[in-house]
Amino acid sequence: MLMYVGRRLLQAIPVFFGTTFLIYFMVFSMPGDPVIALFGDKTPNPAVLAQVTAQYNLDKPFFVQYFLYLGNLFTGNLGVTFSGRDVSDILASALPVTVKLVLMAVVIELLLSITVGLISGLRKGRVLDHSNLIAALVLSSVPPFVALFVAQYFIGIKLGWAPVTVGANATWGAMLLPAIVIALTIYVTGMRLMRGSVIEAQSAEYVRTAAAKGLSRKRIIPVHIARNSLIPVVTNSAASFGALIAGTTVTEGIFNIPGVGNVLFQAIRLGENATVVSFVTILTIIYVVVNILVDLLYAVLDPRIRYV
Amino acid sequence: MSDRHVEHYVAPIDPADAIEVDKVSLGDRRSNLWIDAWRDLRRRPLFYISTAVVLLVSAVALFPSLFTNVSPTDNCLLVNSNGGPIAGHPLGFTLQGCDVYSRIVFGASTSLSVGIFVIIISAVIGIPMGAIAAYYGGWIDALLSRVGDIFFAIPYFLAAVVVMSVLSAHRNVFVIAVAIAGFAWASLARILRAEVLQVKNLEYVMASEAVGRSKFSTLLRHVLPNSLTPVIVYLTIALGGAITAEATLSFLGIGLPSSIMSWGADISRAQTSLRVAPMALFWPSLALTITVLAFIMLGELIRDALDPKARAHR
């Protein structure tokens, strides 16, 4: 186990350097003046221009630039946004909001996957199974921003059941609607995993043994079938946690949730490319770290898996 | 000793039966993975529906003027701003007074061409990376897989956001496709690598090398054609995903410039009047969703049909 953890962490090192290098390379090797590009469509003030050039060490060779930038990243000096706020300050206030939203979405997704997957698996091949699968596929094909608008319009504006925008005070209740919408657009994978393992479990020896002992379906289904089918679904949900943190830009933008994604959303819309780059880097690092944790979780959860 | 008589019954041997069993009837229907899959697909109504949608969207994208004679950009009268449907304009008007139906018709080619460019670029990078890594193994595999890991570790949408933000002066259909495919290929390479790892140990691959065919030629001629099934499924589904990605980037305002028609950009522009004129947002959203759904559904059906285990499960 310790060996596995060590190996997994070692593997992450080249990925970490690679991803940060790639983002840095993409920004600073594009055609044209990278500093001007960072200002998007705006014409920069010469003083700001000189300051940004110095900030990114653009007068030095490319590799030196990159390592200076990495050094800043490690010491927590993440730079400032266009409006002059410290990026680390923004992160401290915005990240908890995003984590709250994503946590809620993942829990809903998990519950949906488990119940719908269990029902489908137990009714394999019947009409209910097919319609469950098609419904999940259709929901997953709706582009997220379309799904969010539909929910915002019908549930927020027409029915008035949920706040249309969340605003500064991001409570659990206010973020419930976007969390449900996110969950609905992604639960197809988890639901299929659950369905597959339930189908397999039904013909497994231990389930037949339980039935032969005279246990009722009421006891076999939750205790023997469902419990043993949970591992892939839980790890899948954990993996989507990372992907969702990195992908809340549109959700938070549309519902005006003050999270990390919203900062990125505003920066994109305003063309503040320097802020865009630093937040994409941060989100990518979070994504990489969460994926490592998920792999470790998988090793802890499933004792059958032996990593050498 | 014992007077018990045990009788063994031995069936008379009839050589004709054995011949019957061994007989190969050449007139029978041929059967292989794709023929079986095709037989399976033909029985599924959803296959016909999604194929029809794909064909319809392709036709609209290729010949938009067959479907409407209203220009999507000219004759936009502010009098019609956010207007409802009238004769000749079945879906009403946008905030700028342009015809919604015509804009949807002319936006189809953008979505479709971005989707097609993305899967071509992903295939051109991902197939060699995955196939060579798995087939040659050793340090080549280690190197190519680590490179793939790095691209895989960056969510491709975020990468596209960076590329499109920085390239604000050069936004067009091809650039947006490169921005999306530049990172999306890593998943394809992973899928193909796993498949080639299985195929390369099969007897026919060994046989091909044993008769003196070079490693590279064996890869091209025997290994790749037998590993492409999951790639085809992935690419069909990825086409839907790429259309969504383009629409989302255009929605964020870093996709295509307003001179190029795009469903995502139209949805973004209609957002401001969501409360008063929801239909201008609804129609392009519907077109986008149906198109994406058709590709994803088609890919899923092909995946199901190609998987004998899944077929038995039904």
Image (cartoon, rainbow, N blue to C red):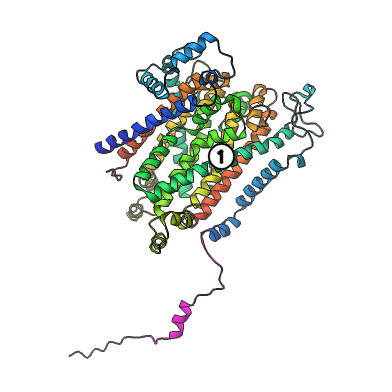
Residue sitting farthest toward the top = A47
Labels in figure, total = 1
Dot 1 crowding, Cα within 10 Å, few <14, some 14–19, many 20+: many
Q: In this view, does B273 lie to the left or right of A151?
A: right
What residue type is disc 1 on? Val
Residue drawn at x 69%, y 22% as measured from the top left: B276
Q: Is residue A235 above or below residue B222?
A: above
Q: Is residue B99 or residue B64 the one in the foreground? A: B64
The x, y position of residue B145, in whole percent, is 39, 41
Residue B64 in view of the camera: yes
| Residue A305: percent from left, percent from top | 30, 44
Disc 1, SS: helix
Q: Going 45% across and 32% down the picture, which residue do you hit?
A: B154
Residue at x 60% of width, y 57% of height: B42
Q: Where is residue A205 in the image (x, y as percent from the top left)?
A: 34, 55
For the question of whether residue A195 can be seen, the reply is no
Residue B124 horizontal/vertical position (percent): 52, 44
Give the prevailing secondary structure in the magenta stretch.
loop
Chain for disc number 1: B
Front-most of residues A210 and A153: A153
Tell me the magenta residue range.
B4-33
Frontmost residue, A34 versus B245: A34
Residue of label 1: B118
Quadrant for residue A71, please give it: top left
On whether residue B10 falls in the magenta region, the answer is yes
Asked if residue A258 lies in the magenta stretch, the reply is: no
Looking at the image, which residue is at 38% across and 47% down? A225
Question: Residue most toward the left?
Answer: B1
**Horizontal placement of B22 versus B63: left or right?**
left
Relative to the observer, which residue lies in front, B103 or B208? B208
